[in-house]
């Protein structure tokens, strides 16, 4: 059984909003053995939506549609679905009552325009929205089962889990099963170039294997996706675990976590486990390292303080970096990064201190110290480590700051593991 997912909204086509519904829905489908063959994004144009629905229904057994169910003039999914079905919209009093109840419970007045949300294509079955005003819909077009859900992720997820998923399981069972289930695993790595990583696991990425293994690189982090298919979730999980174990063996400490783990999550676990503390001294990252370390609940157990020493005077006054050193080597230099980390550790009394200084751009770079040149440092009781990064002049300011923060946090992770890569 195969599926397509349609996301409706001009804001998605223009890149003003990010479509998070389609990836989430694909994962849910995979878990019950339904292959998603295509994600399609369509703007708020009636003819375009009609054409996309018809094509998807011609090509697929299942079509999931999100978005375009609101009360405004550009919400056209209801009309498009009716046209694709070849029927008229009909008023459903029970839907209007559910919408009115939503407003009553919140002591708000329902606008007359919300009545349009109670219009459902003739022959379609409405699906109650327990989190919002837009009912979903279930229909049949040709061989395809069609489910339409709101575009708001919180509303969509509740509707999918409560109504759509049970219906899909029934459809799969009625068709004699979907040919097994798919279990997904994602390993997250940092520090190894994608080309080198690919060489180390090239045999596991061969076409035709079960599981399939692939990589995706985003802002220094390389994710390794493992998709295993089997007749039961337990069998698929065992197949995925086999490759995950082998990948961890080959890549070692480059693997810092799984699924949605961030490098700071891994560091937090290690700091808490080892009962260690950390402080930060930041220049070009402007507090981003401290933010990431404290984004995690329970961070007060390990994070004591952070210094944002953007000016040379602040580096000297708060961290004790000698002005003569700054004058001689420049603020963006190995000696200054080292002195920042050591001064931060001395002032805060922590087990570890992290420091970052660099040229985030787009201005301020020179031939000797171009945009993207960053020094990250870690001070511990027995040693100080400084790394020079050349992140590239083509990166945006935010990208340089993001990668610098990840790099220095990863430096702490490796120190806690006592491995240098």
Image: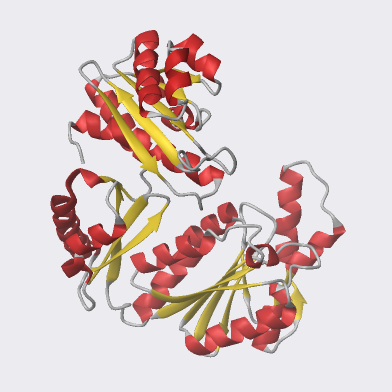
Q: Nearer the viewer, residue 163 or 192?
A: 192
Residue at 73%, 51% in the rendered image: 101
Query: On the rendered structure, is 275 left or right of 174?
Result: left
Residue at 36%, 23% in the rendered image: 335
Residue at 13%, 51% in the rendered image: 249
Measuring from the top left, give residue 416's x and y in whole percent. 23, 29
**Does residue 316 show up?**
yes
Q: Place residue 42 in its image quadrant.
A: bottom right
Above-or-below relation of 147 to 304: below
Q: Place residue 153 in its image quadrant.
A: bottom right
Measuring from the top left, give residue 70's x and y in whole percent. 72, 62
Q: How is the image coloured?
A: secondary structure
Q: Nearer the viewer, residue 226 or 406?
A: 406
Residue at 18%, 51% in the rendered image: 251
**Does residue 185 show up?**
no
Measuring from the top left, give residue 96's x and y in whole percent. 75, 62
Query: On the rendered structure, is 329 left or right of 126?
Result: left
Query: On the rendered structure, is 112 left or right of 43?
Result: right
Q: Nearer the viewer, residue 188 or 138?
A: 188
Q: Place residue 253 in its image quadrant.
A: top left
Query: On the rendered structure, is 210 left or right of 52?
Result: left
**Which residue is farthest right?**
112
Q: Quadrant of the C terminus?
A: top left
Measuring from the top left, give residue 211's x and y in whole percent. 22, 68
> How many marks do you count on the picture?
0
Above-or-below relation of 34 to 150: below
Q: Quadrant of the N terminus?
A: bottom left
């Amino acid at each position: 059984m195969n599926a397509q997912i349609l996301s409706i909204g001009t804001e998605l086509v223009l890149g003003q909003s990010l479509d998070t519904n389609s990836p989430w829905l694909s994962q849910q489908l995979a878990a019950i053995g339904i292959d998603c063959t295509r994600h399609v994004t369509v703007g708020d144009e009636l003819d375009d939506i009609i054409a996309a629905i018809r094509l998807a229904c011609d090509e697929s057994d299942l079509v999931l549609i999100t978005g375009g169910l609101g009360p405004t003039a550009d919400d056209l999914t209801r009309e498009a679905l009716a046209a694709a079905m070849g029927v008229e919209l009909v008023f459903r009093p029970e839907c209007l009552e559910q919408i009115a109840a939503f407003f009553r419970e919140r002591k708000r007045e329902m606008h007359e325009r919300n009545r349009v949300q109670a219009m459902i294509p003739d022959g379609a079955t409405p699906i109650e929205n327990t989190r919002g005003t837009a009912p979903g819909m279930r229909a049949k077009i040709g061989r395809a089962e069609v489910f339409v859900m709101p575009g708001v992720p919180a509303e969509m997820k509740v509707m999918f889990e409560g109504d759509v998923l049970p219906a899909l399981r029934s459809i799969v069972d009625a068709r004699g099963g979907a040919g097994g289930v798919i279990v997904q695993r994602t390993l997250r790595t940092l520090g190894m170039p994608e080309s080198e990583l690919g060489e180390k696991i090239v045999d596991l990425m061969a076409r035709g294997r079960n599981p399939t293994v692939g990589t995706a690189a985003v802002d220094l982090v390389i994710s390794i996706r493992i998709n295993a298919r089997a007749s039961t979730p337990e069998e698929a999980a065992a197949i995925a675990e086999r490759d995950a174990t082998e990948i961890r063996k080959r890549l070692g400490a480059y693997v810092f976590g799984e699924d949605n783990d961030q490098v700071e999550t891994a560091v937090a676990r290690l700091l808490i486990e080892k009962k260690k503390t950390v402080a930060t001294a930041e220049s070009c990252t402007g507090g981003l390292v401290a933010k990431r370390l404290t984004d995690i609940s329970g961070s007060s157990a390990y994070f004591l303080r952070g210094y944002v020493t953007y000016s040379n005077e602040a580096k000297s006054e708060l961290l004790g970096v000698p002005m003569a050193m700054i004058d001689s080597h420049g603020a963006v230099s190995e000696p200054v990064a080292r002195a920042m980390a050591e001064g931060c550790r001395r002032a805060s009394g922590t087990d570890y201190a992290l420091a970052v200084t660099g040229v985030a751009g787009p201005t301020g770079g020179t031939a000797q110290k171009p945009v993207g040149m960053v020094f990250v440092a870690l001070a511990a009781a027995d040693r100080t480590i400084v790394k020079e990064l050349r992140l590239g002049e083509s990166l945006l300011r935010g990208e340089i700051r993001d990668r610098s923060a990840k790099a220095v946090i990863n430096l702490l992770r490796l120190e806690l593991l006592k491995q240098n890569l």
